């Protein structure tokens, strides 16, 4: 088995530095998340602590940062866009709590720290996940700027990506569906691509982009989700918990296996990722705006060739 050049806990290829704009946007999202988390313990201190620890554990803020990089080139980074990016990060943090539960992946390490159910108990972890989802929708509902139909549209987009047409469906398939390359790709679209798509569709709604430009962003999101999850599956086999900041080898521990390696040999899965990486270049090149910094940021997280 070939070894990877291992990433840091933040998921960054150690040979790459974040573009300056991406680093600034990630810091902005982190600062706003910290401000929101400070209020979680006002009425339920222990629950609030579990929520805040899950959100503020070291992470890439990849989804939110992507949103701000795209928005900066397509209409500007407004308060509404920033709040939406933060809401997306809250949803992502909630999804990690749920994915890690004993009834799901049974993980004990996440972002270099004990998972929420290990640190705070299973019942509080479930409640923390639910509470973070509700906080995300609250933030979208009260953010200044979008009016009426546009605000409702952003909330609907986020709701769709969480429910039976998004994250929940993807996790259910991941746990229970028979494994074929087609079904694994569908899982990737639902578990991973749906959140990328939601972020880009929210930008399109807030900035008033038409169908053609929205579709270009959505196409990018699906390929991005498949590449991101395929690389994650490869690292589950070839990575180390110390450098990835999370448990490895979990996919192989679920019966006949999970993810891409359930239907492919390692070399086949690596070739599959490389094809997705090439398709990602095509999707980035098809965008109507200068995507140079966006491309640099994505490639800092998803290298062309991880082997």
Image: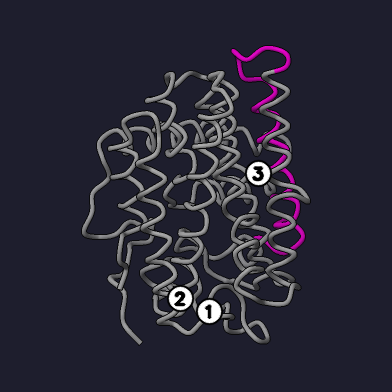
Q: In the picture shown, does residue 84 fall above or below 182?
A: above
Q: At which x and y percent is residue 17? A: 23, 49
**Viewer-nearest residue: 105 or 190:** 190
203 vs 272: above or below? above
Residue under pointer 3: 48
Q: Percent x, y for residue 99? A: 65, 62
Q: Which mark is residue 269?
A: 2
Q: Earlier in the sequence, mark 1 or mark 2?
A: 1
Residue wearing tag 1: 261
Whether 166 is drawn above or below 32: the answer is: below
Up the image or down, 195 lies above or below 208; here it is below
Q: Which mark is residue 230?
A: none
- Which sits earlier in the primary sequence, circle 1 or circle 3? 3
Q: Give SS at disc 2.
A: helix
Q: Residue at x 65, y 73 (%)?
A: 106
Task: Count neighbours of disc 3 (C-alpha within 10 A) and say few if under 14, some if 14 to 19, many if 20 or more.
Answer: many
Earlier residue among tags 2 and 3? 3
**Alpha carbon distance from label 1 to label 2:** 7 Å
Give the residues drawn in magenta, as a range: 120-149
Horizontal relation, residue 49 to residue 239: left or right: right
Residue 63 position, x and y percent, is 49, 43
Residue 129 among magenta residues: yes
Mark 1 secondary-structure assignment: helix
Pointers 1 and 2 in contact (C-beta within 8 Å): yes
Q: Judge left or right: residue 52 versus residue 246.
A: right
Quadrant assignment for the N terminus: bottom left
Q: Give the residue displayed 68% in from the left and 49% down from the top.
A: 46
Q: Position of residue 275 (x, y in %)?
A: 40, 64
Give the residue displayed 38% in from the left and 43% down from the top. Answer: 284
């Amino acid at each position: 088995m070939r070894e990877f050049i291992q990433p840091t806990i933040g998921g960054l290829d150690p040979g790459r530095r974040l573009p300056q704009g991406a680093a600034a946007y990630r810091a902005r999202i982190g600062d706003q998340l910290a401000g929101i988390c400070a209020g979680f313990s006002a009425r339920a201190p222990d629950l609030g602590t579990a929520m805040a620890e899950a959100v503020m554990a070291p992470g890439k803020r990849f989804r939110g940062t992507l949103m701000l990089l795209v928005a900066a080139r397509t209409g500007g980074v407004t308060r509404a866009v920033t709040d939406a990016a933060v809401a997306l990060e809250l949803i992502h943090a909630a999804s990690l709590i749920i994915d890690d539960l004993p009834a799901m992946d049974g993980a004990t390490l996440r972002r270099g720290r004990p998972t929420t159910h290990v640190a705070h108990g299973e019942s509080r972890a479930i409640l923390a996940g639910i509470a973070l989802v509700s906080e995300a929708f609250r933030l979208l509902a009260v953010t200044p700027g979008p009016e009426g139909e546009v605000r409702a549209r952003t909330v609907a987009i986020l709701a769709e990506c969480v429910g039976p047409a998004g994250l929940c469906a993807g996790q259910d398939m991941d746990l229970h569906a028979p494994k074929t390359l087609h079904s694994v790709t569908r899982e990737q679209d639902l578990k991973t691509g749906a959140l990328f798509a939601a972020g880009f569709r929210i930008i399109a709604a807030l900035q008033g982009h038409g169908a053609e430009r929205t579709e270009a962003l959505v196409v990018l999101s699906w390929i991005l989700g498949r590449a991101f999850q395929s690389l994650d599956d490869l690292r589950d086999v070839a990575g180390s918990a110390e450098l990835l900041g999370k448990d490895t080898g979990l996919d192989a521990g679920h019966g006949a296996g999970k993810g891409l390696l359930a239907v492919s040999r390692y070399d086949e899965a690596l070739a599959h990722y490389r094809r997705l990486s090439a398709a990602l270049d095509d999707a980035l090149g098809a965008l109507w705006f200068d995507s140079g910094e966006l491309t640099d940021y994505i490639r800092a997280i998803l290298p062309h060739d991880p082997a």
